[in-house]
Every structure is written in C-alpha cells, then in structure tokens.
Amino acid sequence: MVSDKQFQQYLRQLSLPNVGENGQAAICESHVLIVGCGGLGTAASMYLAGAGVGRIVIADDDDIELSNLPRQITYRSNEVGQSKVKTLADFLKAQNPDINVRTIKRRLHGSQLALEVSLADVVIDCTDNIKTRQAINKACVENRKALVTAAAIGWSGQLSVFQFSKLATPCYHCLYPFEELDTAMKCSESSVMGPVVGMMGVYQALEALKVITDLANSSHPELKLFDGLTGQWQSLKISHDETCSVCRDSKTTTGIKNDPIYRK
C-alpha cells in the first residue's frame, strides 16, 4: 500500500483514475533494469525515479566525456572523467531518496545479463550498438520480460515495446535480423540532436510505467518512428519472422502471418 508520505509525493499520479493507489503501489514496488546510461538512459531514469519506481538498476561501463553533455542531461562539466553509473546513481538518489538504485559498471552479457533481466519487471534498452541490443532482446524473450527499446540518430528517433509475457509476440530480432551495423549507422559515432534523444528516453519511461501499471497496449507491437524536423510520428506494425532464431519457438503465428514488417 501507499504510505501517507508517498500519497502526498505522488498525488498527481495516483489521482489519475486509471492509476490510483494500486497503480502507484505497483510503481513503488517495481524493479526496472536500464542498460546504458547515455542520452536515453539519463532521460528515462530521471522520470522513473521521479515516478517512484522502487528499484532501479543501471548498467554501463563508460565514463563521462565532454561530448556527452549536450544530450546526457544529468551530467555536469565538472564530472567529466567520472563513472556514468556512479554519477547517475547519485543524481537519482538525490532526486528521490526513497528509491533504491544499484549500479553495474560493466557491459552486461552472458549469464549476468540473463540474471539481471530475470530479476526485473521491465527492461529498458538504452544501448547504442546492435550486438548488445540483440543480446538484451534474447534475454528478455527467454525470461518473458517486457522490453522497451529506443534509438536516435540525426533528427530521427524510434521506439518499440515488446511484452514477451504475452503470446504471439514478435521480437527485436524479427525487426532487425542482423548482428552488426555499418560504421556509419552506429549511434555512438553518428551526429544527433540532443532533444531527440531526450524525447525517446522520456517516451521509454512513459511506456515502462504503462507496463508496470498494466495500461500498456497489449496488442501487436509497433515500431514508432519520430521525425524531429517535422514533429511527426509514424507507427508500423512488427510481424513475426518465421525464421527468427530467437523467438520462433515461443510464438504463435495464427492471424499474423500476413502482417507487414518494417526493416531498415
């Protein structure tokens, strides 16, 4: 249940008819894993901490660089060279002392990634390389955990939500069935407008909270595309890849065989 202090702190949220005290209690008791503490991870984590997510685990092996500051908004110029996870954890705990923040200063992979995913209620992929994204997706499929993934390059952003606890759900590998990108397409090496990254990160936080409060759209997952120059959104349905090596054994194809699929 929500304490008197929590009731006052989160009043604007729990006063929403479709959230209420039960929804806020679910948020306060939830466990979210954020992989990547760059522009996406900093924006998402701020709003999740503010919303009262009880346990936040943040994983990243990088230190803060000067070029990070325009889009990774929790970091300050006097913190250049310091650990991203430690600095972000300090920020989040100062923002909301009642939440628990655990840091992992390394790249998650293998059995440790699987363990951290299995412990979480929602996994937020804020990484910048396709190999790590595929590993996170596979761990979420195997552990049937909700995955919220996003990316931003240039003036463009994209976001998808996969609820793997549901039957007949395509996965990230169905959308992007490869393990490597050309160097020119790598997020970490491409130009980007900071607020676009922030928008995608905030959107990830919103989608995670909808999953936690059972308000997320449980229908077929979509790829949402954002154009920062025009302010326009486009939604494209994601279809199962019948040959997908990740989720083919866990999906049901009835009624979805002819759905369109977007590949980039």
Image (cartoon, rainbow, N blue to C red):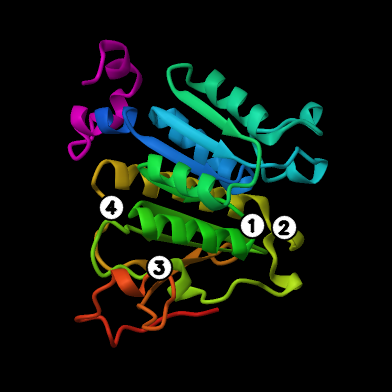
At horizontal 68% and vertical 56% (from top left) the residue drawn is: 193
Residue closer to the observer: 124 or 165:
165
Q: Which mark is residue 171?
A: 3
Residue closer to the observer: 248 or 93:
248
Q: Which residues are magenta?
A: 1-23
Label 4, on which residue? 216
Rendered location of residue 161, percent (x, y): 39, 59
Q: Gap between marks 4 and 2, in whole Å?
A: 30 Å
Amino acid type of disc 3? Cys
Amino acid type of disc 2? Ser
Dot 2: element: helix
Disc 1 residue crowd, few under 14, some 14–19, many 20+, Cα 10 Å: some
- Farthest residue, direction bottom: 258
Label 2, on which residue? 188
Label 1, on which residue? 128
For the residues bearing labels 2 and 1, Cβ distance under 8 angstroms = yes
Above-or-below relation of 264 to 59: below
